Amino acid sequence: MIRCDELTKYFNGTRALDGCSFEISEPTLTGVIGVNGAGKTTLFKSIAGFLKPTKGEVYILDEQAFQNIIAAQNVMLTEDGMSFYPTASLHELIGSYSRFYPNFDQSLAIKLTEYFRLEEKKKYNELSKGMKSTFRLILALSARAPITLLDEPTTGMDPGVRKELFELILKDYIKVPRIILISSHYLGEMEELLDSILFIHEGKVLKHDDVEEFQTFLTGVQGAPKLIESLEDKLQIYDCKDFGAGIRRIIVESKDLESLSLKEDVMNSLTFKGVSPEDAFVYLTKRKGGGIDELYHS
């Protein structure tokens, strides 16, 4: 239902997306993960048909997404920069969205508005930042669009409310399965919700796979420095750290480590530890060159 073919987008000569290609054809809760500026919002706006690709294509239901009414009625995008009629109340905004989205559940929207204690007579601009995020999420879930794009949906919320809203997203997805993409640079809070992860870095799709694959993608290898050094030239190293004089740890790709077919005595001299998807995200986006430690030792 979503297909991006070599999607590339420039803004005034700056490349925001760089040849992004992926396809999602089944209902899924997918986390779109990347640091600030990675291209997540540009990707979402391209899928929603708001932005015309500089190169490549975006297809929604086999239709080109850009300025396509069929695509628009089947995609719901919520983001921090959304604008609403300044004089319209929350109740009127719910009514307006219900007239545009064919599957909009107005009863659900009203129930959720009451549950989160949002006064329907209030205007959107009168809400706090956290309440605005909550209301946008209510609209997004109530639209019941086949493709729902949640761009940083918990902006401005405290941890307790974020947890409750992530639970709401999961329950609504279970009740009405569809494609839901959630962008964030905080993977740990929502990892348990997700079926898969789309990892974007510097405008490129680095990896798109099931959460389980991310859970085993990297491995920490720890042991005596000389033994670890003997492995470093044979593997791509994502992180290296010494713990005192006698222990060194490196982070490597699990499949590369397995391909070495290390001897049993070497295996017994090393300690192996899995790397969580959240930590893998940190290592994969780590700055090239010196880290913070070098700033204090230069």
Image (spheres, helix red, strand yellow):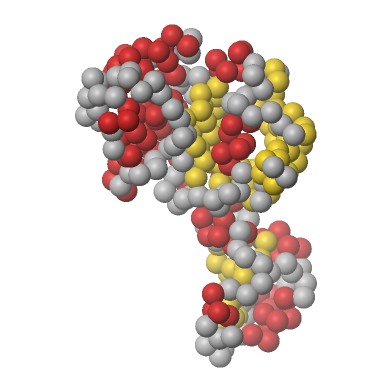
**Residue depicted at x 56% and y 90%:** 245
Residue 122 in which image quadrant = top left
- Number of numbered discs on residues: 0
Q: Position of residue 92 (x, y in %)?
A: 33, 14
- Residue drawn at the location 48% of the way across and 13% of the way down: 101
Quadrant of the drawing holding the N terminus = top right
Location of residue 129 (image quadrant): top left
Of residue 217 and residue 163, the one placed in the foreground of this image is 163
The x, y position of residue 84, in whole percent, is 41, 24
Tell me which residue sits at (53%, 34%) in the image: 181
Q: Is residue 21 visible?
A: no
Q: Is residue 288 visible?
A: yes
Considering the image in quadrants, where does the C terminus appear? bottom right
The residue sitting at 54% across, 75% down in the picture is 292
Relative placement, left or right, of 261 versus 127 is right
Indicate whether 51 appears above or below 144. below
Q: In the shown orientation, is residue 204 left or right of residue 279?
A: right
Q: Nearer the viewer, residue 289 or 249?
A: 289
Vertical relation: 88 (above or below) 252: above
The spot of residue 251 in percent (x, y) is 62, 68
Side of 278 relative to 98 (left or right): right
Front residue of this view, candidates 188 and 287:
287
| Residue 257 spot, x, y in % from top left | 70, 65
Image: 136 above or below 219: above
